[in-house]
Structures are given as C-alpha cells and as structure tokens.
Amino acid sequence: MTTVAFIGLGNMGRPMATNLVRAGHDVRGFDVSPAALEAFGAAGGTPAATLQEALAGASVVISILRNAHEVTELYCGEAGVLKLADSGALLIDCSTIGPKAARTVISAAGAAGFQMLDAPVSGGQPWAEEAKLTFIVGGDRTAVERAEPLLRNMGQRVLHAGIAGNGQVAKVCNNLIACVSTTVVAEAFVLGKKLGLDHQTLFDIVSTSSGQCWGLTTYCPVPGPVPTSPASRGYAPGFATNLMLKDMVLAVTAAREVDASLPLGDEVVEIYKKVVECGYGDRDWTIVAQALESGLYL
Ligand code: NAD
C-alpha cells in the first residue's frame, strides 16, 4: 500500500484516484472545487481540505490539471508542492501541458531534490473509469520503474518515451495525428453526402479501403456508423472541443519553438477556434462534422 496525494479530481482525476483506492492505496485527494472533493469522498476516497493536508506523509504525488499555468502554479507556486511535499516523494504529472512547461517544472523539481515524471494519458473518461488508460511517460528509468505499479492500477499500458518532457512530445504528436485525420474524415462525410452518398455506405466502403483510420472506425465523427462514438451519443464528451483546441495549440506552439513546419496543424487550430465560436467548446471535438455540415466555412 502506498500513501498517495492525488491533486485534481476532475473528469479524469476522480476515476483515476478512485481506481487507486480500489487497488488498496491510501489516497488523499485534493481539488480546489468543493463539488469535486465531495464526489471523490462519495466514491470512497479521502478528501483533503488543503493541499498541505493531502501531501503530508505521501510518498507519491499524482496530479492531473487542465493546463500548463495550473500545473506550474501547483508545483512552483509560493505554497506549492515543491515547498510542501515530503522529501523523497515521487512526483508524477499526468496533465497535457506540452514539453516546454513540463521540462521547466521537472527541472525545478530536480533542483528541489525531487524525482519527477511527465505522464500524460491517452484515453478519455470511460478509459479512466475502467483503468484502461495509456500512460506516456518521460523521465529517468528508475523513477518510471518506481511509478509503474501505481500507473498500472489506473491503466493498461505504461510507455516510456525517454527523457523528461518526452511523454508530452509523444502526446502532442499523437493528438495532432488524431485531430487532423479525424477532421478530414468529417470533411469526407460532408462531401460524400452533398454528392449523394449516405454516411453508412461511405463508412462501409472506406473502412475497408485505404482511407481507413482510427478517426473513422473508432471515433467516427458522424452519428450512426459507430454506435459507441461520441457522435452517436449526441456529441457528449468524450473529449471536449476546448481541450482538443488546447492540445492543438500546444502542438503548433511546440513546433514554432523548434522551427518545425505544421501547415495542417495551423489550419486545424483555426478550424477548432471556429467550432468553439459556434458554441461547441464543451461538446465532443468531433462535432466539427456537424459544424462543417451546417456550413462553417460558407
Ligand atoms: P477537468 O477540468 O475535468 O479537471 C481538472 C480539475 O483540476 C478540476 O476539478 C479543477 O478544479 C482542478 N484544479 C485546478 N487547479 C487546481 C489546483 N491548483 N489544485 C487542485 N485542483 C485543481 O479536466 P480533465 O478533463 O480531467 O483534464 C485534465 C487533463 O487531462 C488535461 O490536461 C487534459 O488535456 C488531459 N486529458 C483529458 C482527457 C479527457 O478526455 N478529459 C483525456 C486525455 C487527457
């Protein structure tokens, strides 16, 4: 049994922390939202009233917050984790924040004497509920080995991407591929329908042809062909458009920092800004298909 401080009990954090409780760990959860704390308590966890209370006696700290600003504040702020955590605690941040911010925080953690990993996750809330996430981890192998048993209580796969920050590199590259490819699948369905082909017929043909991809056969952006996709469930997230836009901005920002050219990535950022302007920020990001069908670019 490990004593874990789990920070950030939102859509992803609450089920992840709950799976650690189920695996028999002593988990003190902290969130700035009273509703999130209450939900964690109702799920059998131990809610902590303050960050300090959560960290006291914890040998592992796991966090999953929305963005780089929140993560930097949590770890490096005046009364942050680097000031309050027990010496020797292993720090694991599972948020998607891009390589630059992750490396800055991990370097500050190292200077304060802590081992720290970036471990962003692939898979949304249903995968978190069922402990089927994939952790994409950057950092020292010794720290990865220390983290792995706990990560396996929350996920199916632990992939070591290399040095600190490399988990974030792999994560933003993965989401760039998923987002760009699924967006063009949405475009193809709009085009097919306007040219007289119904969605199911197009799906049946393309899913066994060279256009086959994850964004078609698993996460199909139009309702019907894949009953489990968010599109077939009224575009309930899933993964909110706001978060996908954040991840695409992380990808194109990281690209600028190393002079990499991402013309498709840049264009997709503009598309998702428009989807958010349409009022779809909280719906699943594949609602881009509906936005395009209703004339987003006309
Ligand atoms: P969320 O908004 O549901 O949860 C974030 C939680 O952090 C909130 O409850 C918020 O109150 C809390 N929080 C913020 N600052 C805090 C602080 N200083 N101390 C304690 N708690 C604090 O977000 P989410 O959907 O769980 O996503 C979290 C991260 O996981 C994001 O980086 C996202 O990109 C990534 N992610 C999400 C999904 C998904 O499907 N939702 C999938 C993969 C990766």
Image (cartoon, rainbow, N blue to C red):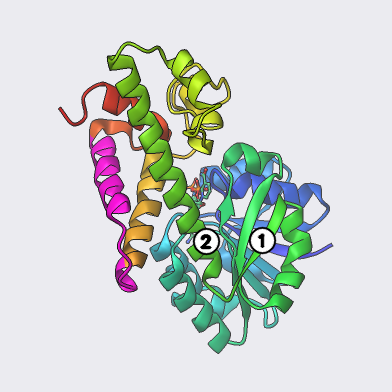
Left or right: 298 in relation to 270: left
Which residue shows up at 70% across the image and 47% down it? Answer: 18
Which residue shows up at 70% across the image and 69% down it? Answer: 60
View extreme (front): residue = 210
Residue indicated by mark 1 = 159
Q: Main secondary structure of the magenta part?
A: helix
Left or right: 260 in relation to 210: left
Magenta segment: does it hold 266? Answer: yes
Residue 170, labelled with which disc? 2
Q: Position of residue 203 (x, y in %)?
A: 49, 21
Q: Position of residue 179 (x, y in %)?
A: 41, 44
**Depicted 64 relative to depicted 15: above or below:** below
Q: Is residue 282 visible?
A: no
Kind of residue sitting beneath label 1: Leu
Which residues, given as a range, are shown in magenta?
A: 256-277
User: For the residue with label 1, is its CB less than 8 Å from the closest atom of ligand 1?
Assistant: no
Q: Position of residue 127 (x, y in %)?
A: 64, 41
Element at label 2: helix
**Depicted 201 relative to depicted 250: above or below:** above
Res 262 quadrant in image: bottom left
Quarter holding the C terminus?
A: top left
